[in-house]
Image (cartoon, helix red, strand yellow):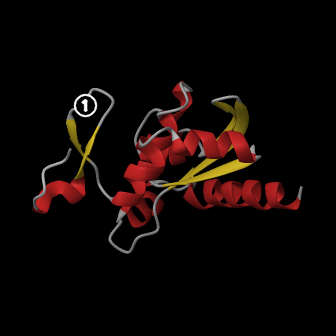
Amino acid sequence: MLPKNRTNKKLIKDDSNELKRIGNRATKICAYKAEYLKREIEALKPKLIVAIGGKAVDALLNYSEDERLYGGIEELVFEKRGIFNNVKIGNVTTDIVVIPHPSGLNTTWVRLVKDHPNAKCILEKISSKIIETMKT
């Protein structure tokens, strides 16, 4: 059982029964407890998953060994172009689109657009992929 103190909101027990720090309750429940996220993906069989931010990609990596998804958010979006087709998660093969988190505190958007002259083109392709998938 977790200690009943102020830090228990940020601790869970992992598979080895060790206490582990987790960012927030939603991430803890969806990504780490009883493979909830994997079961949801297998049940819904989505054509496309939009991973918004690094934590979302990390959660998906718990259930996929696709090496294309390894790397920081800048690498995934601007060097690898942000679109990953035919990613296997559990018994489902789906496409994944990766974008930086849109938080106002996240300076990634400003830095990436400034540092990557082709940023607009890449983001337009990502948008097109999302819209295409929604139409089918």
Q: Say if residue 74 shows up in the picture.
A: no
Q: Is label 1 in a helix, a strand or a loop?
A: loop
Residue nearest the viewer, comparing 50 with 78: 50
Residue 68 in percent (x, y) is at 55, 30
Q: Residue furthest bottom?
A: 104
Q: Is residue 61 left or right of residue 19?
A: right
How many marks can you see? 1
Residue lying at 77% horizontally and 46% vertically, measured from the top left: 47
Q: Which residue is mark 1?
A: 17
Q: Name which residue type carries label 1.
A: Asn
Between 79 and 97, the one nearer to me in the picture: 97
Q: Position of residue 9 (x, y in %)?
A: 23, 59
Which residue appears at 53% of the width and 44% of the height?
Answer: 36
Q: Nearer the viewer, residue 52 or 32?
A: 32
Q: Residue at x 73, y 33 (%)?
A: 93
Furthest-right residue in view? 136
- Estimate the x, y position of residue 11 in percent, counting from the top left: 22, 49
Q: Which residue is drawn at the image coordinates 42% and 43% (left, top)? A: 33
The quarter of the image holding the N terminus is top left
**68 with respect to 109 (left or right):** right
Is the residue marked by circle 1 packed among few (<14), some (14-19), or many (20+) residues within 10 Å?
A: few
